[in-house]
Amino acid sequence: METGYVVTGDHQLFHGYTLFLCKRHETELHYLDADFKLKFLSEMSLVAEAVFNAFVPDKLNYELLGNGDSHMHWHLFPRRASDQVHGPVWWTDKTLMSSDDVKPSGEQLETMQTLLLGALEKLTDNLSR
């Protein structure tokens, strides 16, 4: 991606949790020049679609907060009817979200990254045609 980095979350209480980190260090969308901002939002949407295609959730939650880390980054949370928490992600107990029980093994993480990369490549290939 031109404007950001795609990162799989270290903890996967919400299977497929992915972040899209802005390559520019800014705290607010309106600080970005118009062209970069539109490209950043477009690429975030593309990454979100790849997350949706790769992990097949019932719903996808998008969040750009910045309260804890003052660098723009999107949280993309695949949501399912079977989730332990049915409200906003941030209502979830932090110890549960960062528990070793929801930390994928190296092999699981690699499988997730392969699925996500494949879904992203398929979308970008379709755009270039």
Image: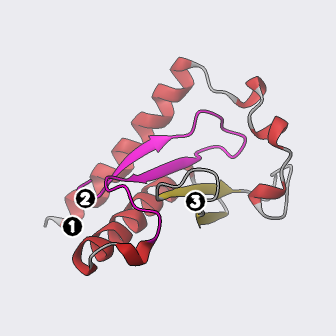
Mark 3 vs mark 1, CA separation in Å: 30 Å
- In which quadrant of the rendered view does residue 115 lie? top left
Residue on which disc 2 sits = 124
Contact between labelled residues 1 and 3, with CB atoms less than 8 Å apart? no
- Please report the residue visible at 56 percent of the width from the left and 57 percent of the height from the top: 76
Q: Earlier in the sequence, mark 3 or mark 2?
A: 3
Pointer 1: residues within 10 angstroms few (<14), some, or many (20+)?
Answer: few
Which amino acid does the dot numbered 3 rest on?
Gly
Magenta range is 1-28
Provide the secondary structure element on which disc 3 rests: loop
Contact between labelled residues 2 and 3, with CB atoms less than 8 Å apart? no
Which amino acid does the dot numbered 1 rest on?
Leu
Majority secondary structure of magenta residues: loop
Number of the label disc, if any, that sits on residue 28: none
Residue 15 lies in the magenta-colored region: yes
- In the image, taking residue 64 as reference, residue 113 lies left or right, namely left
Image x and y of residue 26, in percent: 40, 61
Number of the label disc, if any, that sits on residue 66: 3
Residue on which disc 1 sits = 127
